[in-house]
Image (spheres, rainbow, N blue to C red):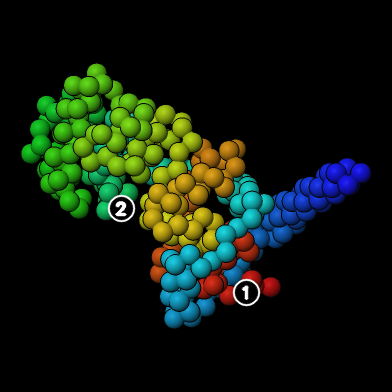
Amino acid sequence: MAKKTTRTAAKAKKRKAASRKAASRKAASGKAGKTALKAAEAGTAARRKPLKAQAKADAAATHGEIRPWTQAEVSEAFRRFQSVDPAPKGELQHVNPFTLLVAVVLSAQATDAGVNRATPALFAAADTPEKMVALGEAQVRDFIKTIGLYRNKAKNVIALSERLIAEYGGEVPGDREALEKLPGVGRKTANVVLNMAFAQPTMAVDTHVFRVSNRTGLAPGKNPLEVELKLLEVIPAEFMMHAHHWLILHGRYVCLARKPLCEKCIIADLCRWPGKATLAA
């Protein structure tokens, strides 16, 4: 009799928990979500506290002192991102998987805009590994000399092109391990290529994604890998294909490093950043 009572109580507890989660999801995706989007459009989503308070808040975020979001809140945030921008695109210009790979390699410690100013002429001259090797390191340097660390990057572009020809028949491999063995290619670059060229639901964590994940409490982590793994864990599968683009664009144009535009943030009501003042009326 005691065992039966225990089982019944456990089932009741599970039903209550499920009911609470459902209620939370409904509340997040209903009127509150629409109100938040309207406030962001009007530029009244939230206010920023004074600069000293913002700096203190960012320090708290860096040290993992911000409480993570609930699963319902994560889902609601990405529903909003999707409603505003259903099919976000990466901003690096490219014409095929190879030029995408090269562009991402060149973008390390550089802006996408800066890379995009240099690569059209480069890719017009060499859009395959074979053409890039024929072009030669010196000419590659000339094409990309406006990009930071261009000498070492030119060397890597030629070296990875040679490796692609020798080991993969001139094709970019759709495999993380193979990509990370290429000169100048790290985990973030591999994730971008796998997502954009091979439609794999990867999470590339750059400075913008890292900042947004920590500052908001979405997925706090001490390093990019820790943030990546947490994001992969909490983001629903239905949003994973575009998730890293939404977060990058949000960090690049809204959740700025020095002066985040909280008043235009579509997830301001979900964000746990202490540097954000109360929601505007």
Quick one: 1 or 7, which is closer to the camera? Answer: 1
Image position, residue 69 (x, y; %): 60, 58
Q: Evaluate whether residue 116 shows in this view.
A: yes
Q: Which quadrant: the N terminus?
A: top right
Sort mark 1 into few (<14), some (14-19) or many (20+) by Cα contacts within 10 Å: some
Q: Taking 3 as reference, is 169 above or below it?
A: above
Element on which disc 1 rests: loop
Q: Quadrant of the C terminus?
A: bottom right
Disc 1 vs disc 2: which is toward the camera?
A: 1
Residue, x 49% and y 58% (percent of image)? 220
Considering only vertical position in the picture, is 272 above or below 203?
below
Q: Which residue is mark 2?
A: 111
Is 104 placed left or right of 46 in the picture?
left
Task: Say the numbered circle drawn on residue 278.
Answer: 1
| Residue 142 tag number | none
- Do the residues under discs 1 and 2 have CB atoms within 8 angstroms? no
Say what amino acid the circle numbered 2 marks. Thr
Q: Using the rendered view, name the quadrant where residue 62 is placed.
A: bottom left
